[in-house]
Amino acid sequence: MKSILVRYGELTLKGNNRSVFITKLVQNIKFKLKHLKEFVEYKKDNNSLTIEVKEEKLEEVLKILTRIFGIYSVSIVDIVEKNEQKILDKTLEIAQALKEHTFKVEVERKDKSFDANSMDLKIKIASNILRNTNHLKVDVHNPENKINVVIKSDGVYIFTSRISAAKGLPVGVSGKGLSMLSGGIDSPVASYLTMKRGMQVDFLHFMTPPHTTPEALDKVFQLAKRLERYNQSSFSLYVCDFSMILRELMHIKEESYRITLMRRIFMRIGNEISNIIGAKAIITGESLGQVASQTIESINVINRTSQLPILRPVITFDKEEIIKISKEIETYEISILPFDDVCSLYVPRNPVTKPKVFVAEEQEKDLMLEEMIQYAIDNSVTRYVYRDGDLVEKEWLHKEN
Ligand code: ATP
Ligand code: MG
């Protein structure tokens, strides 16, 4: 068995919420490691969690843990009894295996009842290493290796490295949001960043068959599934067939407003679905000024149709910055597959860059908006439910109520 020490990071700052957050985090960790149940054991105390793992699953567990929001860093640790000789033996064993030449010993005494002064113990450990090895020397300022010794109530934890993890807050502590997922590069990144602040994310995608292909839809499925690493283990993807509404939008007077009106309807449908599923925010991948529908005027005209807050995590990001994250979270390769989502086929020749609220409202009067939206909710939304990475159910949304 190997032991992994899991550190909570930012959670330590959050006074009252702390125990709620930790409970949620531990629950999320257990869900993500559910398929490895037979290989892991948990030991929890107030400040950290230790996971015992069978050696053959160590790499896999580390990879999963470093992607779970709320975990700050992890270390592979050796745990020995609170006995000075045991500490000296283990630290020497670790030192003997080090390749580089300089080291420093750090001792932290969390269990104050342990009968040794940190400074004394540090000196004893270092001199024991120097006496019994001939390839190492001490460098307190810029060591190539740090040998950390943490004395806790249940034992002495010894480790040489900290593996940085996802940080952020445990998914679920900020409630649930509905992310408009297009199949492009930006919206998966926006979804990921929202999860980072503790929001569980369900997805909503608009498709317009036959103009959008099954491959385009498949991309969205792949994206939602790829994001599952960071998300709650169970989530839903809502797919709305928007073709009928889009056909209506072909007849509006101001062709240049077609995308604006489309976005306003997306938003209204998103709000309706959010109310049904208990989502507290809508998330989009909009970035200021990136395209005509993302000018501040457009954002204003779109905002008017939402009762819920709209979170736009990448609003200030350059495309390059968004791409960098999408590569890190491995959504990029899926996003750049060449299949078009709803927008591209119906883009007017000159989309309006500074739409006006009254012009949008004026044109909506010619549409049977409420009926259209209600009809779409009742008949055109399919809900795909994922549990622990697998698609487990497919149903029409309205059957839920
Ligand atoms: P993305 O890369 O996320 O597609 P984009 O730069 O292509 O973004 P737009 O196509 O203007 O931008 O879309 C802006 C936002 O509107 C998207 O980030 C997404 O949140 C939402 N959106 C666009 N198309 C769809 C769709 N077919 N289904 C669901 N949401 C969509
Ligand atoms: Mg797009």
Image: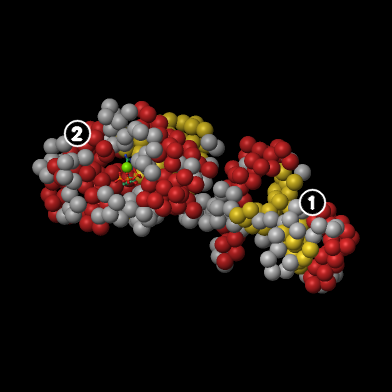
Question: Can see residue 49?
Answer: no
Closer to us: 300 or 76:
76
Please give the name of the residue rendered at 61% of the width and 44% of the height, measured from the top-left corner. Answer: 63
Query: Regarding ligand 2, which quadrant of the image does it lie in?
Result: top left
In the displayed structure, 188 sits above or below 219; it is below
Image quadrant assignment for residue 313: bottom left
Res. 247 mark = 2
Callout 1 secondary element: loop
Residue beneath label 1, please?
97
Cα gap from disc 2 to disc 1, whole angstroms? 69 Å
Closer to us: 98 or 322:
98
Please give the name of the residue rendered at 12% of the width and 49% of the height, measured from the top-left corner. Answer: 362
Find residue 52 and report its horizontal and vertical position in percent.
73, 46
Q: Which of marks 2 and 1 is in front?
A: 1
Q: The N terminus is located in which quarter? A: top right
Image quadrant assignment for residue 167: bottom right
Please give the name of the residue rendered at 48% of the width and 42% of the height, measured from the top-left corner. Answer: 330
Query: Which amino acid type is marked by label 1?
Result: Ala
- Neighbours of disc 1 within 10 Å: few (<14), some (14-19), many (20+): few
| Residue 184 appears left or right of 228 | left
Find residue 150 and report its horizontal and vertical position in percent.
75, 62
Image quadrant assignment for residue 145: bottom right
| Residue 69 appears left or right of 154 | left
Q: Which of marks 2 and 1 is nearer the N terminus?
A: 1
Does mark 2's beta carbon lie closer than 8 Å to ligand 1? no
Query: Which amino acid type is marked by label 2?
Result: Arg
Find residue 351 and report its horizontal and vertical position in percent.
18, 46
Callout 2 secondary element: helix
Res. 266 mark = none
